[in-house]
Image: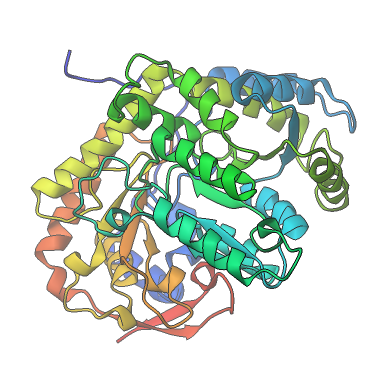
Amino acid sequence: MKTIIEPFRIKVVEPIRMTTRAERERILAEAGYNVFLIRAEDVLIDLLTDSGTGAMSSLQWAGVMRGDESYAGARSWYVLRDKIRELTGFEHVLPTHQGRASERILFELIGGRGKIVPNNSHFDTTRANVEHTGAQAVDLVIDEGKDPRSKHPFKGNMDLAKLEALFERVRRELPPGGTLRDRIPVAMVTVTNNSGGGQPVSLENLRAVRKLCDRYGVPFFLDACRFAENAWFIKTREPGQQDRSVRDIVREMFDLCDGATISAKKDGIVNIGGLLLLRDPELVRRADELLILTEGFITYGGLAGRDLEAMAQGFEEVVHEDYLQYRIRSTAYLGEALLRAGVQIVEPPGGHAIYIDARHFCPHIPPAQFPGQALVCGLYRHAGIRGVEIGSVMFGGGGTPPPMELVRLAIPRRVYTQSHIDYVIEAIGELFARRGELRGLEIVEQQPSLRHFTCRFRET
């Protein structure tokens, strides 16, 4: 059948408070035109993020009740550890309270002034954690990944020629006796590529990155927050992969890398939790020490036993192919409808979100006046929908506009029905017809790092 249904039934519901446009106008102004500063109860449809906002299953909630809250060696830890070993093949599994904690531990250990960390595209916290150590975060996504209209099936791919050129340039700069790993402690690939429209990375590209890293002696890591969604795209888009199971593809993805940071709040389908996966025994030893210092003991990592149980079950459910088919198709449903309405998005639709091209939507607003943020404010004002800007506010703090001005509509897992998404489609279509009314913004307060979370604006 052509209709793909949700592979679950709804058992518990949460009411939505309906607001008026006048209320939203006041709320928006009080929040300084930053939707991060709006109370969640004042949002009708919340597409700010897919991180930690999913609905857990009955088996995950059953796991919550089974949680062993012992400080060290809790049974719940071994349940999670065994599931991650089965899924990824990694023996050394470090739990953390979320993905950015895994990033902080990793880069505190391997980062430092003068070092370079290449990635297809660093997301905001990854970049901040790299740069906090004094290292340089470099984005090397393929050119098609910077073009919203490109139909390339794997726009998240690392540009191999640029990665090799970086390796060669840095190698020529090394002092006598120096190694490339001294300057480039790791090469990363983010799957799927969150900053670039939720676009996947092909298995062919991951294999090629692995070969380059082997040739130059550089460790290869994944930012694997959405590894299962990426595996589904490999299965459905990459030649020769259609007959493989998602589990098999996931295992190969992890077999290719030396380590991974994971926010379980995405493809772990939990509200809190993360992982740091490592192979190097010396790095494991140092990471364990830092984990104990900052997160908690190595068998709980800042989490309750109930969280470990829910994570273990979530990592099982996320590789179920009926779930992934529903997840990816429901996201595409939103993207295809917006394209039919004339709204340009990053094509083809990504896995966890739809990214609107704000430059196309707001051609009258220059990058210096933040067209993406103007669209975010307009969408909340018009319909109570909360998205997030991924453009000059998030990545333009250095004064150079990023390649794309985007608004991300991230879809929480197993939360909204088709009628909710139809409401979003209708609202964006109405706003698009009146897009000339949208006004630019200027920042009146900001932090030096990760300013998009707390800065305040005024309309111009």
Quarter of the picture holding the C terminus: bottom left
From the viewer's perspective, tell me whether residue 428 is left or right of residue 40.
left
- Of all residues, the one furthest to the front in this rendering is 176
Residue 126 position within the rendered picture, expressed as x and y whole percent measured from the top left:
58, 58
From the viewer's perspective, tell me whether residue 176 is left or right of residue 155.
right
- Quarter-of-image position of residue 137: bottom right
Residue 376 position within the rendered picture, expressed as x and y whole percent measured from the top left:
32, 64
349 versus 230 height, above or below: below
Q: How is the image coloured?
A: rainbow
Name the residue nearer the viewer: 372 or 391. Answer: 391
The number of callouts visible is 0
Residue at coordinates 24% horizontally, 45% vertically from top-left? Answer: 152
Name the residue nearer the viewer: 240 or 55. Answer: 240
From the viewer's perspective, tell me whether residue 88 is left or right of residue 141.
right
Name the residue nearer the viewer: 448 or 307. Answer: 448
Name the residue nearer the viewer: 414 or 218. Answer: 218
255 versus 113 height, above or below: above
- Residue 238 visible in the displayed image: yes
197 versus 27 height, above or below: above
- Quarter-of-image position of residue 88: top right
50 versus 70 height, above or below: below
Residue 440 position within the rendered picture, expressed as x and y whole percent measured from the top left:
28, 80
Residue at coordinates 56% horizontally, 33% vertically from top-left? Answer: 256
- Residue 8 visible in the displayed image: no
Quarter of the picture holding the N terminus: top left
Residue 69 position within the rendered picture, expressed as x and y whole percent measured from the top left:
83, 29
